[in-house]
Image (tube, coloured by chain):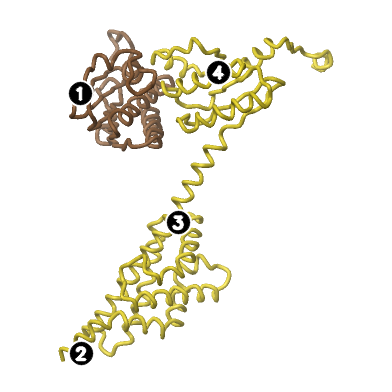
Chain colours: A yellow, B brown
Amino acid sequence: MTVSEQDAAESAPRVVSSFLEQRKEQIAQRWADAPLFRSVFTVSRDEAVEACKAVVEALSEVAVTGRLEDIAAPGFGTVRDQLGRMAATRARSGSAPAQIAAEVAGLRAPAVDLLREEFADPTAPQAQECVLTLTLLLGTLRLVVMETALDANTELIERQRQQLLEVATPVIELWEGTVAVPLIGTLDSARSQIVMESLLEAIVDQRARYAILDITGVPTVDSLVAQHLMKTVAAARLMGAECIVSGIRPAIAQTIVQLGIDLGSVLTRASLADALAYALGKQGIEMSRSDAGASAR
Amino acid sequence: MQPSGQASATSLPIGSDADLAWVRQEVRQRAAGLGFGLVQQTKLVTAASELARNTLVHGGGGRVEITPLDNGRTRGLRMCFIDSGPGIRDLELAMTDGYTTGGGLGLGLSGARRLVHEFTVDTEPGRGTTITAVAWVAQVPSSRPGVG
């Protein structure tokens, strides 16, 4: 008696595992109609059934090892990619994480119903234990799906952060010997270092005499941003280029003054156009409206 | 006017450069929502940026509590920057323009004080620092008698 009870206690994961293996087809057929799979595999139901079978197989594999609550269990490895893609597809179509989690939870009921049918007496202790085991297993599956989805998001955020660093700092040649950098967004230490490097390189490459730093797109100029600007200006000066800071909006100008930042050593202009006119004027280039343009009016 | 503001205080962590950007955005949104003008918004955001960086660089990180205020006449915003760092030993010196221990311009504390209406520093060596800055929406310098 004692032996058989022990047997029962030990074998619940095994019973569940063999149940999953034997009823794979039926479970897959039911899951394929669940919102999670139906909304991802919109084209072919067969594909959904195949995907479901793969998940059931993975669960069976995890159950047999007894690592019911271990999201790192090797069994999940085979379906992790697939689950991640599914979660990503759902996220792209605008589903909140909570909704995806609820959809994974929705897989439990059909599977548990089938498991109950296996037992003559669904209220027997062993039946209860098997149901509990399957519930635990599906709870872990839910965690695996969420973890995979979050991992993908973290990776995406990191990639975008790197992109931001590079994308937002182009150096533009406005005229022969005149380059400009339109600064956009937050000018933290990492970004200002990249700005300085790319500007100095451009000064050498284009043999520029004038460099314009346009801060129209910088929302906040605090003392650190101002310091970065001044350092960039000083470095450009050492390279033999005169630096002009343009795009200082009225609100920023007032704030800089009250903050006590002394930009006296820096040549400034209100707009990029003013800065360009200054640089051209210094090079002896004059602009005038042509006769043709004037008569066309 | 409804007592909408008092309850909705926000607490944000300050632990990295990315957090500073978050603090700036939150302050800008709050200030715009309370009716601060563009210049005042810019000043508030700049002050928040300076003080948050102080918390990060000198206090070793901490948090900021942003609370909307309403004194019956006008609305305002209170920002509390709290860290449990080494504290400030000589407050008078730290508040001097150009004095710095962090390699900056030395305008963080003194400049931020000029950008807001009320400014208090609560610090003790070894017990951290709490800096409170308050700004009110468009304070008219002299209230006109007979109105309100």
Subunit ID for the residue under disc 2? A
Question: Real-space Cα distance between discs 1 and 3?
Answer: 46 Å
Q: Which sits in the foreground, B134 or A17?
A: A17
From what the image shows, is residue A64 above or below residue A192? below
Neighbor class of circle 1 (other Cα within 10 Å; few <14, some 14-19, many 20+) is some
Q: How many marks?
A: 4
Residue receiving disc 3: A95
Q: Secondary structure at mark 3?
A: loop
Identity, as a three-letter code, of the amino acid under mark 1: Asp
Subunit ID for the residue under disc 4? A
Identity, as a three-letter code, of the amino acid under mark 3: Ser
**Which residue lies at the image location 28% right of the left edge and 8% below the top edge?**
B145
Subunit ID for the residue under disc 1? B
Q: Nearer the viewer, mark 1 or mark 3?
A: 1
Question: Real-space Cα distance between discs 4 and 3?
Answer: 45 Å
First in sequence: mark 3 or mark 2? 2
Q: Which sits in the foreground, A225 or B45?
A: A225
Q: Are marks 4 and 2 in contact (CB under 8 Å)?
A: no
Q: Are marks 1 and 2 in contact (CB under 8 Å)?
A: no
Q: Nearer the viewer, mark 4 or mark 3?
A: 4
Left or right placement of residue B101 versus residue A250 in this view: left
Residue A4: give its label: 2
| Position of the N terminus of chain A by quadrant | bottom left
Left or right placement of residue A132 versus residue A244 in this view: left
Q: Secondary structure at mark 2?
A: helix
Residue receiving disc 1: B122
Residue A290, by quadrant, is: top right
Q: Secondary structure at mark 4?
A: strand
**Which residue lies at the image location 43% right of the left edge and 81% below the top edge?**
A24
